[in-house]
Image (cartoon, rainbow, N blue to C red):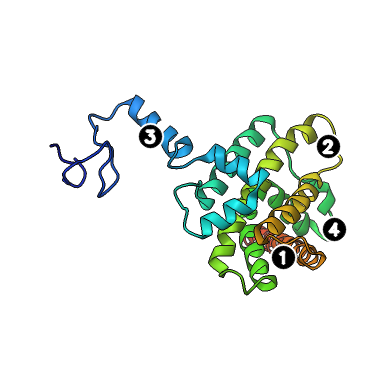
Amino acid sequence: MSKCKNCNTELISDFCHQCGQRSAVYKVTFKETFQDFVDVTFSINAPLINTTLLLFSNPGIVFREYLNGRRKSFYKPVSFFIITTFIYIILRSIIDYNPLTPEGVKVGGELLIEAGQYMVKNINNIMFLFVFTFGIFLKIFFWKKYSLAEYIAVAFYAMGIYTILGTILMFYLKYFNSGFKMLPVILFYFYMLYAISNFFQSKSFFTFIKISFVYLFSFVLYSGIGFLLSFLIVWLRSK
């Protein structure tokens, strides 16, 4: 009987039951390094594709099951947000896509214009705020059902879908119709109506109204904080 090379535990299967490392570990190779990446991203232990498909077809199942303890069955929410954002940044850079129109923020002085342009350039970083504003307002409007931390986890999943929608639609906006850049925001609103009502298993008019308020307030707060932070950074740089 062999022992795990990581924790020295007696092995009884292809994976160590103590630390989870594979029993067959040899010298580090390019093949192993690439395989580890594929395993973490796409394997049964972290099913990115299945999680993504379910988040589109039946998001309530992902939210409820993950919060109820089925952690291994779904891709982790923070990792999901990070990998979708990473893909978005890479593709946006390749096609040189501008998600907003800097000219649209030309109100006030030169500093405000620069702040708006800074926010446009760094929108993928500022969007991280959307996760927390959305989670906070979910807690405010649906405070009895789950904790703030659980709502933040749901928000990470939701913002990952927002990023996917933005990634798909930026090709249309870049090459076909650049005049409707609020399209991802609008489609995401309808997705959230479906996803959150599916999450709470409620299709009442009151539920849809509360979801609409959650979306509106979280989006406005996220945009406001994002612009204020951009303004502060630009102002400090000008000193």
What residue did someone put label 3 on?
A: 36
Mark 2: few/some/many CA within 10 Å (<14, 14-19, 20+): some
Q: Is residue 117 left or right of residue 19?
A: right
Residue situated in front as seen by the camera: 213 or 178: 213
Kind of residue at badge 2: Ser
Q: Is residue 20 left or right of residue 91?
A: left
Kind of residue at badge 4: Val
How far separated are the C-alphas under marks 1 and 4?
19 Å
What residue did someone put label 4 on?
A: 107
What residue did someone put label 1 on?
A: 221
Q: Element type at marker 2?
A: loop
State the residue lying farthest toward the left. 1
The quarter of the picture where the C terminus appears is bottom right
Residue situated in front as seen by the camera: 47 or 104: 47
Which of the two discs, 4 and 2, sits closer to the camera? 2
Q: Are marks 4 and 2 in contact (CB under 8 Å)?
A: no
Whichever of labels 1 and 2 marks the residue nearer the N terminus, that label is 2
How far separated are the C-alphas under marks 3 and 4?
50 Å
- Give me the residue at 78% from left, 33% from top: 172
Whichever of labels 2 and 3 marks the residue nearer the N terminus, that label is 3
Whichever of labels 1 and 4 marks the residue nearer the N terminus, that label is 4
Whichever of labels 3 and 4 marks the residue nearer the N terminus, that label is 3
Q: Which label is found at residue 178?
A: 2
Whichever of labels 4 and 2 marks the residue nearer the N terminus, that label is 4
How far separated are the C-alphas under marks 2 and 3?
40 Å
Whichever of labels 1 and 3 marks the residue nearer the N terminus, that label is 3
Q: Tell me if I can see residue 114 in this picture.
A: no
Which of the two discs, 2 and 3, sits closer to the camera? 3
Q: Tell me if I can see residue 33 in this picture.
A: yes
Rendering coords of residue 28 (x, y %): 27, 30
Q: Is residue 48 left or right of residue 158?
A: left
Mark 3: few/some/many CA within 10 Å (<14, 14-19, 20+): few
